[in-house]
Each structure stands twice: as C-alpha cells, then as structure tokens.
Image (spheres, rainbow, N blue to C red):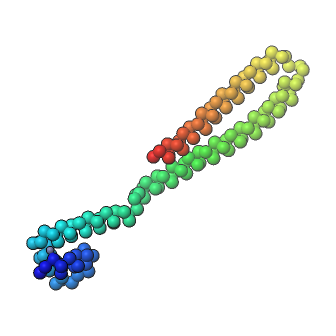
C-alpha cells in the first residue's frame, strides 16, 4: 500500500465516510507511515481550528450579562431623566410661587427673604453639582464599556 492511495482517503477518514475495509487500510498505513500520519494530524489540527472559528465566540452567559448590563444602564439613565424632568417642573413651580407669594410680599422682612433665598440658591447649586457628577459617571461608564 503506497501513500498515493492512502492520502485521498484521509479526508474521508476524518469525516467518517469510509467503509470498514478502507478504515482498516488507512489505519494500518498511518501506523507505519510517518508522512501520512503527520498529514492526518495536520488535517485534524486545521479541523479543530475551523470548528473553533465557526463556534459562537462568546458563551450565552456572557451575552446574557451583556444585555442585562445595557438594560440596567438604560433603566438607570431613563430613571435619571424622568427624575430630572420632575425636579425641573417642581422647582419651576416652587420658584414661581415663592417669588409671587414670598419674595414679592412686602410684609415679609428683607432679612428673612435673604436667608431663605440663600438656602434655596445653595440647595440648587448642590443639586446641580450632584447632577453633573452623575452625568459624568454615566459618560465614564460608557467609555469603560468600550474599553472592555
Ligand atoms: Zn504514507
């Protein structure tokens, strides 16, 4: 049995397409022929790589986590947007009534107006600061996602 007759059978051997007689011939030959045995090993190696490439590269658990992560982030962002809109509406109302009923009321002392005004201004600055920090954190989180 020479190599030229065995080599064409190697692909069929790997694919399990040979009959018993052909399998016996191939196995007998590669047991004694180093060249054909090496060729078979190389073919097996290439097969393995091809199979790995065609497999989904990421396990399902990873994608599950990935989509959960996106969903959670979206949920948090939507939460923040709704919260912000609510705060803006409430603050606008508060500011409107405060100016009309409190600051424009001539019976209330100027010092009290100044005190209340300072507290409100301070609270607004703090709120904006916290909000900006949160926005920065969201942006930062997005970049971290890209890095990964
Ligand atoms: Zn051979």
Q: Is residue 138 visible?
A: no
The residue depicted at 84 percent of the width and 25 percent of the height is 102
Residue drawn 67% across and 41% down? 83
Q: Nearer the viewer, residue 62 or 112?
A: 62
Which quarter of the rendering shows the N terminus?
A: bottom left
Horizontal arrangement in the rendering, residue 95 relative to residue 5 (left or right): right
> Which of the 4 quarters of the picture holds residue 135?
top right
* Residue at 36% across, 63% down: 53
Q: Which corner quadrant of the figure contains ligand 1?
A: bottom left
Q: Please report the residue visible at 33 percent of the width from the left and 65 percent of the height from the top.
A: 50
- Number of numbered markers: 0
Q: Is residue 113 visible?
A: yes
Q: Is residue 91 above or below residue 147?
A: above
Q: Nearer the viewer, residue 95 or 27?
A: 27
Residue 41 image offset from top left, x and y in percent: 21, 67
Above or below 17: residue 75: above
Nearest the viewer among 24 and 46 is 46
81 sits left or right of 95 in the view: left
> Is residue 113 positioned above or below 65 on the image?
above
Residue most toward the right? Answer: 106
In the rendered image, the residue lying farthest to the left is 32
Rendering coords of residue 129 (x, y %): 64, 30
The quarter of the picture where residue 58 lies is bottom left
Q: Is residue 116 left or right of residue 74?
A: right
- Furthest-front residue in this view: 4
Q: Position of residue 107 (x, y in %)?
A: 89, 19
């Amino acid at each position: 049995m020479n190599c030229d007759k065995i080599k064409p059978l190697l692909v069929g051997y790997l694919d399990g397409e040979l009959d018993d007689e052909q399998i016996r011939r191939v196995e007998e030959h590669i047991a004694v022929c180093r060249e054909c045995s090496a060729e078979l090993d190389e073919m097996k190696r290439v097969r393995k790589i091809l199979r790995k490439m065609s497999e989904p590269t990421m396990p399902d658990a990873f994608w599950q986590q990935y989509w959960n992560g996106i969903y959670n982030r979206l949920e948090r962002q939507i939460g923040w947007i709704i919260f912000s809109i609510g705060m803006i509406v409430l603050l606008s109302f508060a500011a409107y009534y405060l100016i009309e009923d409190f600051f424009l009321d001539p019976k209330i002392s100027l010092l009290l107006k100044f005190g209340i005004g300072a507290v409100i201004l301070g609270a607004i600055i703090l709120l904006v600061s916290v909000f900006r920090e949160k926005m920065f954190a969201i942006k930062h989180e997005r970049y971290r996602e890209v890095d990964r």
